[in-house]
Image (cartoon, helix red, strand yellow):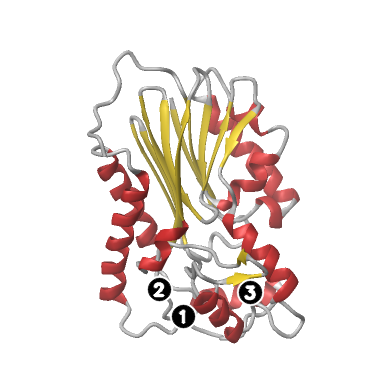
Amino acid sequence: MIIKIQLPNIKYGQLIPSEDAVAAHHHIFCVADGITRDPKLPKDFPKDSRNIRKILKYYPNPSGAKAVADIFCKNFIRLGRNTNDIKKIFIKINGLIRNYNRKKIKNVDYLVNDYFGCVASGGLIKYDVLYYGYICDGGLAIFDKNGRLKFQTEDDMKKFTDFEKKHLKTKNLNYSLPAYRYLIRTKHRNRPNKIFNSRLVSYGALTGEKSAEPFIGQGKIKLTKGDLLVFYSDGFIETLKNRNFFAKIYQKNSKLMPKKLVSFSKRLALKNYEKYGKERSLVATIFLPANKPPQIKKG
């Protein structure tokens, strides 16, 4: 019983390509979210929605960020058949992304010619244990059969954005300016030694840089029959917090799971775009122990 859902940005989805990817194969699951690109023009981003629509015609299409998200999911499924070392899988895929970037980007400027990259989460079940990994705000949540949240990965991007709001972003220096975007991508992305007041103030992304590796989280958790596993991109974070989320997705009839959740998500998005309306994807499954465990090499 596996469902895969990908929903576009409710405001701008018809103007920009999807940059999420999802995949599942028997006991292996993953979601990847391609890093948003700079449009070719203009360098300064407008703040009102009417002008945002105008500049989106310069957004790269086809998207290299989408290509990288696809690289992640395709290879996570492939590599997950042979090992339960999830960090090792992430590192191998990061190397494939490095090869992709070397072919596609000759001179990295961290703006229009930034690295193509993605954040992601993924996992596999062996016996009754889930082995999982994630980077940044790619996430995993596990609910028991009664809807209680048993486990959720940390949102490492939120740690950075909390710092950003207090110490970086000002009225005259913010994400709409290329100098600010350059600052974030060169000084606060994949910088494991970036410490401020004894706290890490950097975030990770799979861009092919080896410095992304310390930001890859992994672990394992014992599952109980009926547990709901949800691998998600950041667009679904607020929806998972909604008190009605579990009731919408947890259906005995598996055909109703995506139908009810999609309808619920769209209603929320129409009410509050900022919280619920951006591109969002998930893979979910209800754990039912198998008679025979999947064959996975140690590793």
Q: CA distance from mark 2 to mark 3?
A: 23 Å
Residue type at mark 3?
Ile
Label 3: few (<14), some (14–19) or many (≥20) C-alpha neighbours in 10 Å: few
Label 2: few (<14), some (14–19) or many (≥20) C-alpha neighbours in 10 Å: many
Residue type at mark 2?
Tyr
Residue type at mark 1?
Tyr
Between residues 28 and 59, which one lies in front from this camera angle? 28
Q: Which comes before the other along the chain, label 3 or label 1?
A: 3
Between residues 223 and 105, which one lies in front from this camera angle? 223
Q: Which residue is mark 3?
A: 52
Q: CA distance from mark 3 to mark 1?
A: 21 Å
Give the residue at x 41% y 67%. Answer: 211
Contact, mark 1 vs mark 2 (Cβ under 8 Å): yes
Position in image of residue 152 (x %, y %): 58, 40
Q: Nearer the viewer, mark 3 or mark 1?
A: 1
Position in image of residue 158 (x %, y %): 64, 58
Q: Which comes before the other along the chain, label 2 or label 3?
A: 3
Give the residue at x 74% y 85%. Answer: 172
Count of marks, rendered view: 3
Give the residue at x 59% y 52%. Answer: 155
Q: Which mark is residue 115?
A: 2
Whether residue 19 is visible to the viewer of this picture, yes or no, is no
The residue lying furthest to the front in this view is: 198
Q: Which residue is mark 1?
A: 110
The residue lying furthest to the top in this view is: 291
Q: Which mark is residue 240?
A: none
Position in image of residue 109 (x %, y %): 43, 84
